[in-house]
Amino acid sequence: MKLKTKKIKPYFLFHRPRKELLQLVKKKQAPDHFLYGLNYLVRDNLEDYFSDLGQGGFNFLHWLFLPLAKWLKNKTGVGFRLDLVLLSLIRLKNSQVIVAVSDSVGLSLAMLKYWRILKKPVVYLSLGLDKRIRKKENKKIIKLYSQFLSSVETVVCFSPAQKKMFVGLFKLDPQKIVLIPFGIDYQFFNRPRKKSSFILSVGKDRSRDYQLLFSLAKKLPKEKFVVVTSKRHLKNRSLPANVKVYFNLSYKKVRSLYLQAKLFILPLKEIGRPSGQVAFLEALACGLPTIAARTDSISFYGFQEQEHYWYYQPGSLKDLKQKTDFLLTKLDQADKRARKAKKIIKNKYTSQITGKRLLKEVEKLV
């Protein structure tokens, strides 16, 4: 359902291609939450409000600025996609407001704003600054980024830890920072469950603690584990015999696994940036009993432990096994708790609600 809005001309600058995802969303073959509100800010012709320019084929500017981007990535953990900004400069200048999706494009836009090359208002969506940026050796970079960020009208954070970093590290005016919980495409995941016999885990980012999960699998040899992740998480690791791993599954297949699993485990490390929320919300939107690491990103949503989900202390195999053993003997009770959490997702944490909140921030600048 589209939100009723006045006619606005935002331009979304993504750090990764989105055209293929948009087509899948239109066909209802993928959830819309990784469009970051685009389909709720714009009524029609969504392709006119973003571009994958420079993200496929040969990109001369990418290679030109690659040494700088790599150096910054190694120093701070955050990329710098100045090439994408420059390639879209004409369209950026013709928009009413720019929505920068990710820190790598947001920081690049902030630099052009600070140097007055670009004057359009910017809404910067921070997807998570790496804690490596706090290193003492990065003082000059932090000072420079602080100057750039001072020129941005609005910074949207998806976790309190991120907001704290922008205020404390970059000395950004708190009035410029908006905290918006990330919401997921509830309608895509709202399907009847067909419970099977396996324990599921989903996620590719580096916050995942699959070593801990595999250790759990070894202690529960009679249980079947299914993991959807990337190959980097299996590098130099041996898989227990009761673990099945999938790579590069379509979102429809991932949804099918959510709906078939009997239990979802979200093994996370605390890395000081938003992580794990998407899989956490997707599992709960499917009404799937969930055990998650107690990190700031997960606690932010306010779900009650044992009432909506179960948590374990990050890194603690003993705690994770205790919670898993308990739920495996109380699955009917866990299902009831998960259904309560599902209702909360529907009422508070959908992509439409996130889009509506982002729309308000954009309209303030138009």
Image: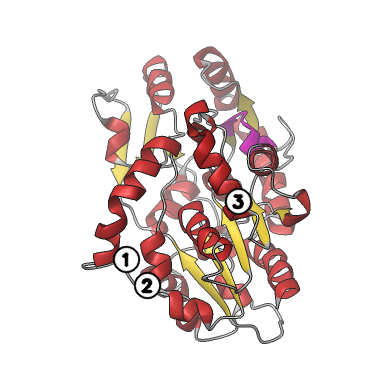
Q: Residue at x 64, y 78 (%)?
A: 2
Circle nearer the viewer, 2 or 1: 2
Q: Secondary structure at mark 2?
A: helix
Name which residue type carries label 1.
Gln
Circle nearer the viewer, 3 or 1: 3
Q: Position of residue 74 (x, y in %)?
A: 37, 37
Q: Position of residue 163 (x, y in %)?
A: 68, 44
Quarter the N terminus occupies: bottom right
- Residue that carries the numbered disc 3 in the rendered image: 147
Which range of residues does the magenta coloring cover?
291-299
Q: Is residue 17 visible?
A: no
- Residue that carries the numbered disc 2 in the rendered image: 87
Answer with mark 2 or mark 1, whichever residue precedes in sequence: 1
Q: Nearer the viewer, residue 211 or 189?
A: 211
Answer left or right for 220 relative to 240: right
Q: Nearer the viewer, residue 127 or 254?
A: 127
Instruction: Report how far apart the C-alphas of labels 3 and 1 lie in the structure.
Output: 28 Å
